[in-house]
Image: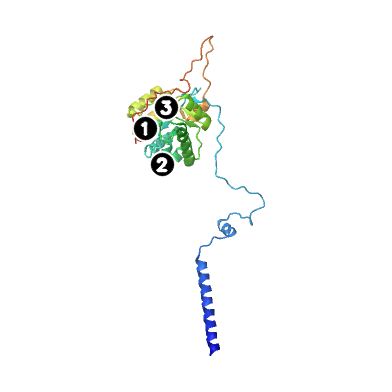
Amino acid sequence: MKLKIWSFAALAFAIATVHFTAASLAAKAQLPTRPSIAAEAAVTGLPTVVTAPLVESTPTPTPVPTPTPLPPRKATYNKCHVAGSEIAMTFDDGPHPKLTPMLLDMMKERGIKGTFFLVGKNVAEYPEIAQRIVAEGHEVANHSWAHPQLTKLAPDALKKEIADTNAAIYQATGIQTTLMRPPYGAINAAITKRINEEFGLTIAMWSVDSIDWRIRNAEHVTKLITEKAAPGAIILAHDIHPSTVQAMPAVFDTLSAKGYKFVTMSELIALDLPEPIRTTAGAQTAPATPPTGTPAAPLAPRATPATTTP
Ligand SMILES: [Zn+2]
């Protein structure tokens, strides 16, 4: 009898143990476990330590574009001196979610290249438009993060405006910008020097102001640009105003008919010739453009910053 009880207890214990083990194994089987590197590699097809060929393979790093060595540049360009009929159309304050794609369509249709001075926060909001600008062969450049007057900023705030915009453009497009246009054209010699030296950016001003931010009329914009255009000109417009985008087909077609060739700002700069120097005794070289640091347009800020208008 005693033996029977013990046998029964032993049997019960054995059954319980088997049951418990089976349960825990089943539970374990259900747990998501991280496969070994080799198992993972077998799935992904990646080479492993075991299967890697003896030839040393270098991991593919995140592509960081090396800036193309540029010909020596001036600190600031207000216009260029070219032997041909090249001209640079530049568009500030975008990308705009509706108007920039419309403008890109117009440019694509005509095979026209231009330069877009982008506002960093707009790039962060519409990175896909910045990508499209680059994909279609245009140049992208820095126009600050939030469109302040750089001359009113503390040194750290200035640095942030420039650096954050460079980063947003790089993140969206993989492009390291080489040009910067100060909002409102507000700049001075000290800031120019800093932007040149600290960020390696050339200051890009303009020679023809379409005044499209003030006079929102397509005919006016067309007339002003087509009358003032000249070889080597840098034309300022804003792709955030419907009237400006409306004006562009006529601007492009009229200037093309006159024989102008649209190039990006960097292409225009690469074509820039030394300014003619008059060597008449005692005569000082008369610069065709305002001296560095003096904007080509009035410094008066707009009543409404362009980036706040649709
Ligand atoms: Zn602007």
Q: Position of residue 303 (x, y in %)?
A: 33, 29
Most foreground residue, 306 or 262:
306
Residue type for callout 2? Glu
Residue type for callout 1? Ala
The label number, if any, that marks residue 185 in the structure image: 3
Q: Position of residue 110 (x, y in %)?
A: 43, 33
For the rendered model, the colour scheme is rainbow
The residue depicted at 33 percent of the width and 26 percent of the height is 220
Q: Position of residue 4 (x, y in %)?
A: 54, 88
Mark toward the start of the polypeptide (3 vs 2): 2
The residue depicted at 52 percent of the width and 31 percent of the height is 198
Mark toward the start of the polypeptide (1 vs 2): 2
Residue annotated with mark 1: 306
Taking the image as drawn, is residue 220 in sight?
Answer: yes
Mark toward the start of the polypeptide (1 vs 3): 3
Residue annotated with mark 2: 125
Residue type for callout 3? Gly
Most foreground residue, 253 or 82:
82
Q: How far is the residue under mark 3 from the one under mark 2? A: 24 Å
- At label 1, counting other C-alpha atoms closer than 10 Å, the crowd grade (few under 14, some 14-19, many 20 or more) is many
- At label 2, counting other C-alpha atoms closer than 10 Å, the crowd grade (few under 14, some 14-19, many 20 or more) is some
For the residue with label 1, is its CB less than 8 Å from the closest atom of ligand 1?
yes
Q: Are marks 1 and 2 in contact (CB under 8 Å)?
A: no
Taking the image as drawn, is residue 112 in sight?
Answer: no
